[in-house]
Amino acid sequence: MKKSLFTILIFVLFSNFLWSKIIMQPYLQAVTDSSIAILVESDSPEPIEAKYSIASSSATQLTAKSQTYKVTDNSAKTYIHRIYLKNLASYSNYTYSVSDNTTKYQGKFITAPSDDSKDFTFAIMGDCRSQTKIHSKIADDIAQKEPNFSIYLGDLCFSPSYSAWKDEFFIPSELNLIANVPFANAIGNHEDSKPNTYAFTQSPDIANSEDLGYFDFYYGPIHFIILNTEVNISTNSKQYKFIKNALENSKGKFKIVAMHIPPYVAGGHGENGKLISISEKLFVPNKVDIVLAGDSHFYQHNLVNGIHHLIIAGGGAPLYTPKSKDYTLNSAKAYCYGIANYSNNALTLEVYDINNNLLDTIQIKK
Ligand SMILES: [Fe+2]
């Protein structure tokens, strides 16, 4: 009797392992100079293993298992596993693979540089919801530019539902991009601060279990501060204190804030008084260089109190007609994305439309 129970137990454990199926191409988040997270959606809480190595034929292959997962709210539960690769070499090319019984998924990435001596490129894309054909073209265009990582500006899909994430954000061209290019997202009002957003995204602050959708990280000489305009950001809120603390203690040569809702905008949804107040009280005195935002679906460059406020919100959502204010330097009613390049103490940000016409160039030298 004991023996047969033991056999059943072994069978159940073994079959669970066998039946754990990866549902979607794994993708990357939370890159730093020594770590990255591979996110893998499966139908089971069983840990998932990744193999990885420095991209060289003679490199030793290492393995890492997922340590945590978050559950989506789909009717058939799915589990978004986090496989953290740690102790990586900075500014180095890696390859990785994740397999289940039937399919082997592969990708590659580069870790962040640990100082300001290395060149790198990053992409900027916002509001890719609702029109997947346009989103697909923008994702393909970004992939062709081979950025090291991307900053997304929210409204990745029309609603917080599992099907909206799957139908509008995790389309083949986007998965092809993010399998090799990690992204950080400033949460938008459409996906919202909801369970699927927290399941599908991961901040670089992987040790912090209290993920509130706002975080900061360094990439070479740039200090990125990613905000969540869908939770409390008023003076004396937890998020306001986080921004103040991050900026006042910043070691970044360049400071870039990314948020879905823009403080300053001419046309679209209009200015946001609460965010203008944060810009005046925190961004200006702490010398933020660039504020990246989405939400008003067009391209716009506003220069206010020495800060470049860029709206790069042409990732796919239906376009609005931009207007002009005294601070507006450039506007375009265009599907668009940004490509920023850092080299030798200079940050050059170019904005392209969907036909790869250059809409704007902004350069900041330090
Ligand atoms: Fe929005």
Image: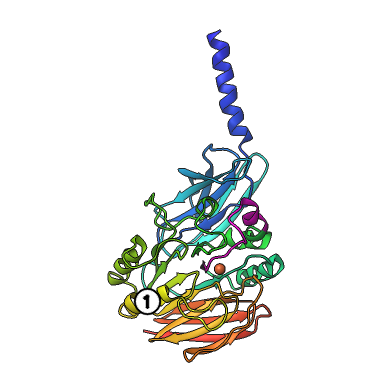
Q: How many residues crowd mark 1 within 10 Å: few (<14), some (14–19), many (20+)?
A: some
**Whole-percent x, y for residue 5 in the image:** 56, 14
Report which quarter residue 190 is drawn in.
bottom right
Asked whether, in this view, residue 283 is left or right of residue 69, the answer is left
Instruction: Between residue 90 and residue 345, name the one nearer to us.
Output: 345
Q: Secondary structure at mark 1?
A: helix
Ligand 1's quadrant is bottom right
Q: Quadrant of the C terminus?
A: bottom left
**Whole-percent x, y for residue 356 in the image:** 65, 80
Q: Can see residue 29?
A: yes
Instruction: Between residue 221 and residue 136, name the one nearer to us.
Output: 136
**Whole-percent x, y for residue 112 in the image:** 43, 65
Q: Can see residue 66?
A: no
Outermost residue to the front = 273
Q: Is residue 67 above or below residue 298?
A: above
Outermost residue to the bottom = 326
Q: Which residue is mark 1?
A: 277
Outermost residue to the left = 249
Asked whether, in this view, residue 105 is left or right of residue 92, the answer is right
Query: Does the closest atom of ligand 1 sit within 8 Å of the Cβ of label 1?
Result: no
Please check the rendered image and state whether residue 95 is part of the magenta-colored stretch, yes or no: no
Residue at image point 64% right, 46% down:
23
Residue at image point 49% right, 71% down:
261
Instruction: Between residue 117 and residue 65, name the one nearer to us.
Output: 65
Q: Is residue 85 above or below residue 350?
A: above
Q: Tell me, what colour scheme is on the image?
A: rainbow
Please check the rendered image and state whether residue 153 is part of the magenta-colored stretch, yes or no: yes
Instruction: Between residue 355 and residue 83, name the one nearer to us.
Output: 355
Outermost residue to the right = 133
**Magenta part of the protein: which range?**
150-167
Report which quarter residue 13 is drawn in.
top right
